[in-house]
Amino acid sequence: MKLVFATLLLCSLLLSSSFLEPVIAYEDSSYCSNKCSDRCSSAGVKDRCLRYCGICCAECKCVPSGTYGNKHQCPCYRDKLNKKGKPKCP
């Protein structure tokens, strides 16, 4: 009985791991840095914009196109809120 349980547990772990996306440090990747550079190109406080964009990109794995708006392209990016309930991502 223990062998059957152990086998089922192992199989379920293997199957569940195949559905998980690999974790990649997107904020350090060229994808996020390029997208955030474009997104923050006309920001008044560029370093803050780049920092929050990098955080959002790492978590959401996407950045809306353009320098403003278009947040409908990335719902995760759009829906992130800061502690005060305001949009977190630039």
Image: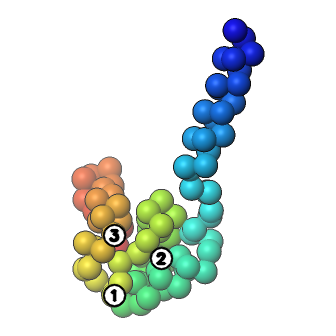
Identified by mark 1, the residue type is Gly
Do we see residue 48 in this rendering?
no
Mark 2 or mark 1: which comes first in sequence? 2
Q: At numbered mark 1, what does the secondary structure look like: helix, strand or loop? A: loop
Depth check, front residue: 22 or 87: 22
Q: At numbered mark 2, what does the secondary structure look like: helix, strand or loop? A: helix
Q: Residues within 10 Å of mark 2 (few under 14, many from 20)?
A: many
State how far apart marks 2 and 1 are (Cα). 14 Å
**Residue position marked by numbered label 1 in the rendering:** 66
Is 18 placed above or below 35 here? above
Screen quadrant of the N terminus: top right
Which residue in the rendered view is the most extreme toward the right? 3
**Residue position marked by numbered label 3 in the rendering:** 74
Screen quadrant of the C terminus: bottom left
**Residue position marked by numbered label 2 in the rendering:** 50
Identified by mark 2, the residue type is Leu
Q: Residues within 10 Å of mark 3 (few under 14, many from 20)?
A: some
Is the image coloured rainbow, by chain, by secondary structure, or in one colour?
rainbow
- Horizontal and vertical percent for residue 19? 55, 49
